[in-house]
Amino acid sequence: MYVAVIGSATCDEKVAAQAREVGREIARLGAVLVCGGRGGVMEAACQGAKDGRGTTVGILPGTDRREANPYVDIPIVTGLGEARNTIVVRTADAVIAVSGGYGTLSEIGFALKMGRPVVGLDTWELGQVGQSVGEVVRAATPAQAVELALSLAGQGQREETGDG
Amino acid sequence: MYVAVIGSATCDEKVAAQAREVGREIARLGAVLVCGGRGGVMEAACQGAKDGRGTTVGILPGTDRREANPYVDIPIVTGLGEARNTIVVRTADAVIAVSGGYGTLSEIGFALKMGRPVVGLDTWELGQVGQSVGEVVRAATPAQAVELALSLAGQGQREETGDG
Amino acid sequence: MYVAVIGSATCDEKVAAQAREVGREIARLGAVLVCGGRGGVMEAACQGAKDGRGTTVGILPGTDRREANPYVDIPIVTGLGEARNTIVVRTADAVIAVSGGYGTLSEIGFALKMGRPVVGLDTWELGQVGQSVGEVVRAATPAQAVELALSLAGQGQREETGDG
Amino acid sequence: MYVAVIGSATCDEKVAAQAREVGREIARLGAVLVCGGRGGVMEAACQGAKDGRGTTVGILPGTDRREANPYVDIPIVTGLGEARNTIVVRTADAVIAVSGGYGTLSEIGFALKMGRPVVGLDTWELGQVGQSVGEVVRAATPAQAVELALSLAGQGQREETGDG
């Protein structure tokens, strides 16, 4: 099982502590952590996963492997800029958003579009537009977020349909 | 000036009428319309722009030019799937979201990330997360949406900063 | 009909003169010129096409429209770096390589892979590897290159098959 | 150290045997194998690397992890089609081409463009065009190919410059 952790490249210590705990739980439950490979939430989640002896994959936006945070095991160098967000989401079975900014919002949109379950910790609230409901499943704690993500991922991937 | 119109590949007639009016106004004010090149909101906007003798660019997800709607003047064939959304946004000076689904949500996230002004007609409502405010500028009518988009675009592009 | 002109971002005057003539012929025969939007061969070809009152599309690698050469009508801002080469090729019905460096070589590979006819003016010579023949059709003059490109494009697109 | 092995998704047993030996040597020397994740040369190389207890990364073109060959440890799901070739090359310190078709040719072009050393086993022969020399370093055996790749990679990455 592959779980993506998404969130800002800079964050305060409270958010970082949550991300670390998410990473630790992902490792403890035997899943591989996927992220954008950089700082902030991504780095904290990778650090947590390594504390738990897990495996971490960092899908980098730039052209140099050295932009990866020190807890990334497998750095993927895309050179695609922000478009690499789509690969973070596609590579995972489920996505956990920890706080987050606009890049995180784009990843939530992609994940819902691609049928990946999204679990949120203090992240974007979405309403409803036409037929689409911004179905981010809320978690109260990091442990619950990981449990929900793995459980929803296990229910199989929903279909991508059409554009929009 | 380049204005992107984003929205679902399928939509009801009320939304289509709004999108057509948006396209017509973009053409009337001399801007080029950029979109994802497919049906629904994208097709209606292109149709409106062609009614107004404007120019339309369709940035397609697939590998075949024939997936473009009949009102696209310049079809760009990316073969990148949903990652082409990032190109729609980058190519434009401002973005107008008309209703929309998850793909539209991803484009709103990208646009805010890349510092492109986003104007919304009956689209996603976003709250605040940490320092990030989901600043979609609301418009009441298609004409107002285009006016706002061009006016905000003219104020110059804000900087992209960091990840997240 | 869409014809891509590929070649280096810097070139000497002799190569530039060939590229201008290629652009002029593309415009004269009513096709749209597609290129990577930058200097050297790309700029010369766009200049030729504008001399001939044609239309030019520049598919840019970076994140800023201002990197386009002054003869690009429709700049597409990909932010994808070199991966944008795949879009230049996919968007065209046929490809003309004028001299060229390693980026051009990558585009020739993509074009042959995607079944786009490739016509070459003083460009890479390719041998045979296993079942694959590097079938770049040689042209002696710019006018012949455009004639060959349009004629081969008219024979319809060959199929992409598999990986490799 | 990361070494990419590139080649066709279908190949005969002689080529597969070479690719397996390349994979085995990569693992034996402690490098990580990167490839496009599919069949033929890619599968054989991954199989060899797993025989040697190495680690394999497969950067897939499609949208489904299940298209990976059974010897891929870390499947990266890009959904980008052939544009994923640029990521295979960027992620590696050096590239080994084993036989190969047009996709391989595109990867050789990208690798030379990005300053990654390319070692070839029975692969494309390239001439010279203007200032560019198609500098694929020839190896006589799989073991020599890996030795050359690691040695050239160790000399540090040359600069990417300009377009073309």
Image (tube, coloured by chain):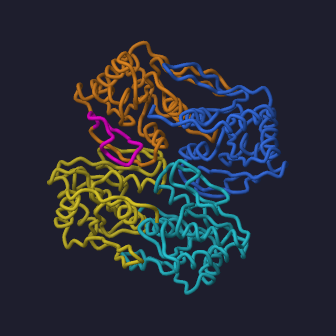
Chain colours: A blue, B orange, C yellow, D cyan
Is residue A77 shown left or right of residue D82?
Answer: right
Q: Which residues are magenta?
A: B56-72
Is residue B164 shown left or right of residue A28?
Answer: left
Q: Quadrant of residue B42?
A: top left
C77, C71: nearer the viewer: C77
Q: Is residue D153 above or below residue C32?
A: below
C158, B142: nearer the viewer: C158
Q: Residue at x 47, y 55 (%)?
A: D83
Q: Residue at x 81, y 34 (%)?
A: A143
Residue C101, horizontal then vertical, whole percent: 40, 69
Q: Residue at x 34, y 32 (%)?
A: B33
Q: Quadrant of residue C152?
A: bottom left
Is residue A20 shown left or right of residue C66?
Answer: right
Residue B67, horizontal then vertical, whole percent: 33, 41
Q: Extreme left residue here?
A: C28
C149, C143: nearer the viewer: C149
Q: Extreme top residue here?
A: B140
Q: Is residue B61 magenta?
A: yes
Q: Residue at x 23, y 65 (%)?
A: C17
The total of numbered circles placed on residues is 0
Q: Is residue B108 above or below residue D159?
A: above
Q: Would residue D9 be visible to someone looking at this image?
A: yes
Q: Would residue A8 be visible to someone looking at this image?
A: no
Q: Is residue B71 magenta?
A: yes
Residue D133, horizontal then vertical, whole percent: 43, 77
